[in-house]
Amino acid sequence: MTQVVVLGAGYAGAGAITKLEQVTDGSVDITWISDDDYHLVLHEAHRVIRDPNARSKITIPVEEIKSRDTRFVESHVTGVDVDDRVVSLRDADDVDYDYLLVALGSATAFYGIDGLEAHSLTLKGLDDALEIHDAVESAAADATHAEPARVVVGGAGLSGIQATGELAGYRDDEGAPIELTLVEGLDEIFPGNDPSVQSALRERLEARDVNIMCGDFISSVDDDVIYVGGGEDEPATELDYDVLIWTGGITGQEELADADVDKDERSNRIYADRDFQTSDPRVFAIGDTALVEQGPDDVAPPTAQAAWQAADVAGENLARAARGEPLKTWTYDDKGTVISIGEDAVAHDVDVVPFGTFGGFGAKALKKFIAARWIADVSSVGNAIDAWSDL
Ligand SMILES: Cc1cc2nc3c(=O)[nH]c(=O)nc-3n(C[C@H](O)[C@H](O)[C@H](O)COP(=O)(O)OP(=O)(O)OC[C@H]3O[C@@H](n4cnc5c(N)ncnc54)[C@H](O)[C@@H]3O)c2cc1C
């Protein structure tokens, strides 16, 4: 029987498995490999910074996602040999494939900034969110309202903004002595997006006493100080800190560095066509791992929304490839953005509501609905209802 192997249990992997099982109905052998035996609803992971109990609501055991016939291997992928068609694993036997879907997400990019990796916490998974919670809690325990703990978030994209919102929520829930600063190197937070959503987010963060610094990149970090900007003629701005959380960019997974498929040289993210096929016709790639072509000079964004949409077509294409049928192509459909700031949220250009940018109850309900719909899609309506209050 044809062996189809899917790597990763994020939106891309979990969604592809669900679709693949639906369309093959036992006619191919499916192996699903990931380093944890649960799917993490990563786009809600920031909730755990404020409340570690939220973790059980945003993790779904793979057993509740996959069918009984799909074999799950809980292991860390250490490499892919496309010539021998083998996936190598840490502390487990190699796995052969006829068709492979790589959906291993991304790693944090540090851009070679001196001291940044050594002195910062990142937010790429559940353990990271718990570590941030603990670090902030401990810094606040050593601080006073006269000399608060200085918590700095570097990078104001989706994860940095939402993490900052949860940190503000934590500070307010606990009455903790914490001073919060969000640093963004480009000119405005949520860079590259519409000014209306940028100002709606800024307004809400500033209302929660978050200091926002934009327009200069972090240039280096040492034990006590973050240096922002600076150059030959200009000294850097010095920011004392107790906890630094870095959410300033993504890059490919180093485990894929030696896989012989076409990749972006700098980031190792894998080039994939609109049908998710890579330069090796037996290897497909989607989600944050991949740069999925969307026309000249354009690729799909590294978002849960894009990975979720792509997974549905990728799952079907794996089945088509196994049957020798033509592959489907995929075009990303931007359904808008909903971003949380603690309990508040801002929605922008969402296709179900023709209001442009808005906050309040409508945006909050939409944010919950999006995550709950995903949980219901990959597992069950019961899990979605259970998670509702923590989303
Ligand atoms: C805090 C935060 C908030 C976000 N908010 C939003 C949002 O509001 N909207 C939005 O659209 N997007 C948001 N994003 C981005 C979104 O979460 C990602 O784009 C999305 O998770 C990508 O899905 P993926 O399946 O490609 O990767 P992931 O969800 O990262 O899944 C990768 C999977 O691969 C596994 N894995 C990785 N390496 C290995 C290995 N070597 N061996 C075995 N298994 C491995 C991981 O455990 C995981 O199961 C947010 C991200 C963060 C961090």
Image (tube, helix red, strand yellow):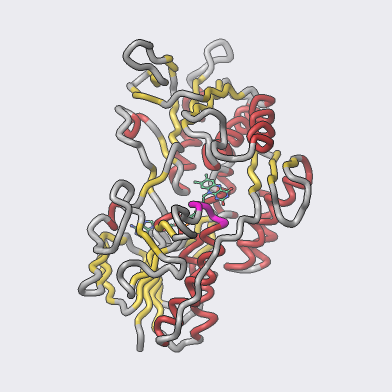
Which x, y percent locates residue 10? 48, 60
* Count of picture labels: 0
Q: Please indicate whether residue 241 sits to the left or right of residue 191 in the image.
A: left
Left or right, 84 with reference to 336: left
Of residue 243 and residue 288, the one placed in the foreground of this image is: 288
Does 315 appear above or below 203? below
Q: Position of residue 9 (x, y in %)?
A: 45, 63
- Quarter of the view holding residue 116: top left
Range of the magenta residues?
Answer: 301-305
Can you see residue 66? no
Q: Is residue 292 left or right of residue 164?
A: left
Give x and y (percent) for residue 130. Answer: 48, 42
Residue 8 magenta-drawn?
no
Q: Residue at x 23, y 68 (%)?
A: 81
Residue depicted at x 48% and y 80%? 68
Q: Who's the residue at 61% across and 55% down the image?
A: 334
Magenta segment's dominant SS is loop
Q: Is residue 259 visible?
A: yes
Seen from the viewer's position, the closer of residues 115 and 144 is: 115
Tell me the quadrant of the picture where the N terminus can be found: bottom left
Q: Is residue 164 above or below residue 286?
A: above
Q: Position of residue 82 (x, y in %)?
A: 25, 70
| In front of the other: 373 or 60 | 373
Q: Quadrant of residue 4?
A: bottom left
- Up/down of 329 relative to 59, above or below: below
